Image (cartoon, rainbow, N blue to C red):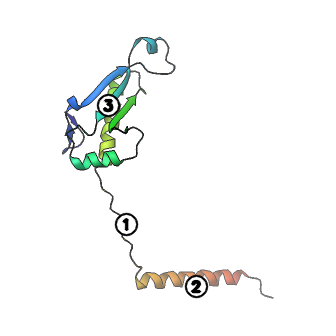
């Protein structure tokens, strides 16, 4: 089980992990060892709650394909274990990003005291600037 939070976890059977060769410079190790990790997670076929699935699919992220599959490639580190851990961390943070619902801000009218203080401050600033003028 891959635990995302104390209330949310995903069975490892739903996550497809494959090791591939890393790209870029790295000497002989790059040509011999498959250290990069390619993680695939199908959102629609997963056991996530429906609200998570809907928000993940609506999320406009380049890691999510049009079919609803999350594809994460991790090749930052030289060891396969560290790349695997980083890929799981990225998947967890992606799922947690849709867990929190941000409520829209409610517009409020300023109180009478706030309006009075704002106008007094404007009057004080204008007087200060008026004193700077050269009197003829």
Q: Which residue is mark 3?
A: 40
Q: Is residue 109 left or right of residue 51?
A: right
Between 60 and 91, the one lying in front of the other is 60
Looking at the rendered image, the disc whose residue lies closer to the viewer, 3 or 1, is 3
Which residue is pictured at 60% across the width and 80% down the height? Answer: 125
Q: Quadrant of the N terminus?
A: top left
Instruction: Say which element carries label 3.
Output: strand
Q: Earlier in the sequence, mark 3 or mark 1?
A: 3
Cα gap from disc 3 to disc 1, whole angstroms: 36 Å
Q: Residues within 10 Å of mark 3 (few under 14, many from 20)?
A: many
Q: Which residue is mark 2?
A: 123
Residue 98 in percent (x, y) is at 31, 49
Looking at the rendered image, the disc whose residue lies closer to the viewer, 2 or 3, is 3
Within the image, what quadrant is residue 105 found in?
bottom left
Q: Is residue 121 left or right of residue 62?
A: right
Query: Is residue 41 depicted above or below 17 in this figure?
Result: below
Within the image, what quadrant is residue 134 found in?
bottom right
Labels 2 & 3 near each other (Cβ < 8 A): no
Within the image, what quadrant is residue 93 found in?
top left
Q: Earlier in the sequence, mark 2 or mark 3?
A: 3
Which residue is pictured at 39% across the width and 37% down the height? Answer: 63
């Amino acid at each position: 089980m891959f635990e995302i939070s104390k209330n949310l976890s995903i069975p490892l059977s739903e996550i497809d992990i494959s090791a591939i060769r890393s790209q870029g410079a790295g000497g002989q190790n790059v040509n011999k060892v498959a250290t990069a990790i390619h993680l695939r997670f199908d959102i629609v076929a997963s056991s996530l709650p429906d609200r998570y699935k809907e928000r993940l699919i609506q999320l406009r992220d380049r890691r999510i394909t049009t079919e609803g599959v999350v594809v994460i490639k991790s090749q930052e580190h030289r060891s396969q274990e560290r790349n695997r851990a980083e890929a799981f961390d990225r998947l967890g943070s992606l799922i947690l990003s849709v867990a929190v619902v941000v409520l829209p801000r409610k517009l409020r009218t300023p109180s009478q005291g706030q309006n009075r203080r704002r106008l007094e401050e404007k009057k004080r600033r204008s007087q200060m600037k008026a004193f700077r003028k050269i009197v003829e």
